[in-house]
Image (cartoon, rainbow, N blue to C red):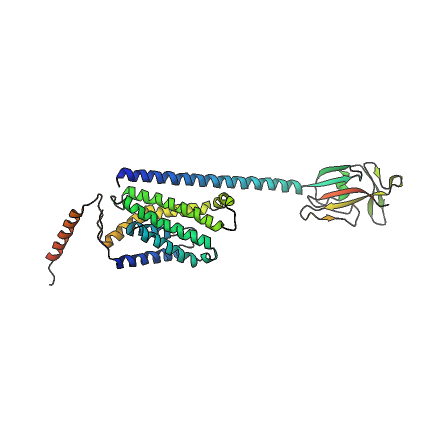
Amino acid sequence: MSQTGVKAIALALTVIVAASLGAGGYLYYQNNVAQQQQRQLLTFILYHDLTHATVIIDYGNGTKETHTVTFTPGMTALQALEKVAVVNKTYWGTYDSWFIDAINGVWNNENNNGYWWIYNVKHYFSLEVEHPGVGADKYQLSGGDTVIFVYQYYG
Amino acid sequence: MEMYVVPKSVRASLVGVFTAAAIAGTFALSPLPNVEIITFCAFVAGFIFGSRVGSTVGALSMFIFSIISPYGSGLGYPFLLMTQVVGMSVAGLFGGSLKKVLQNFKSTSPWTMYLFGVSGAAVTLLYDVITTLGFMYPTIPFSEFPSVFAAGIPFTLVHVVSNVILLGVVAPFVVRSIRAMLGEVEVGHRVDKEELYEKAVEKMEEASNVEVGN
């Protein structure tokens, strides 16, 4: 084959290789950028979630309030509630614990209606809902927890 | 460039040597991920002995190496093994094709070296693409190819660069040495058979004039 033919083949192969390498590089860049953005987003979400706790107040009549509070280590369920609502409470020496009487003016067994405030905690990682057997002032939350106060009928 | 006829037995033994060298060399290089000399051996064999021999060297070397690979036997991944064998055959075929293209060029001429190097990149890229597909099938859908291939791009780059160096820099000199060993004459232009015949006659005459004995 003549030198011109060889040059043409060399040029064609060079273009093919360069285009393939360019496409590969673009693919690699796109893949890495996408992964990096995903990681940043997940880190942001995780950081945000773990430095906050959610307080839900369910009035039992279809009305629900959802609040986000900044979490601090050692924060109790009652402290989280008091950051977002007006709480009336009574200290019970027998249990060495504060008992919630009313949240935002809604009282336990108001006019003998049989409704009382109880609370549950939904954990961030396990997604399990716990029904704590202690007063809200004794229950320490973890970052990302959701504490749900429910005005519930007990008769 | 014209060649003298090389006996079949010599060719067969050289094919064996190429295959053995490819396997042993790739084993020796196995601590370096994606650096191998099967492409090199198949390509060089193809360039010297033709496409059929080159592709046989590539396929055979890859088949044996893949089965006894220190990274795990290819027998567990039949589709990957198949694409590896096909990929290395292509390297031999490529070398054989260039034999015709570069028949008027010395094996160490700049154009030969350039074409060898760029061919090394092309066959390596093709090999990496088809072996990625072979690795994915049937467990990973082909739609995931971009992300799977992208994840291996640093390894692909190592493979391409090492083969460009091996084929573009080392192979031309290896080809020249083997041709010299086979008694082939390399010139920068086509030599017609009469001229070659005259040269051969001259050499024979010189040989007959050499005195043997004390």
Above or below, comparing residue B201 to residue A22 in the picture: below
Can residue B37 be seen here?
A: no
Q: Left of A69 or right of it: where is B47?
A: left
Give the residue displayed 28% in from the left and 49% down from the top. Answer: B173
Give x and y (percent) for residue B88.
38, 51
Q: Left of A63 or right of it: where is A33?
A: left
Give the residue displayed 40% in from the left and 51% down from the top. Answer: B86
Q: Nearer the viewer, residue B65 or A43?
A: B65
Can residue B157 be seen here?
A: yes
Give the residue displayed 63% in from the left and 40% down from the top. Answer: A45
Quarter occupied by residue A47: top right
Give the residue displayed 32% in from the left and 48% down from the top. Answer: B95
- Look at the image and tell me in which quarter the C terminus of chain B lies: bottom left
Quarter occupied by residue A80: top right
State how many labels appear: 0
Above or below, comparing residue B66 to residue A155 in the picture: below
Q: Left of B188 or right of it: where is A73?
A: right
Give x and y (percent) for residue B210.
11, 58
Give x and y (percent) for residue A84.
76, 37
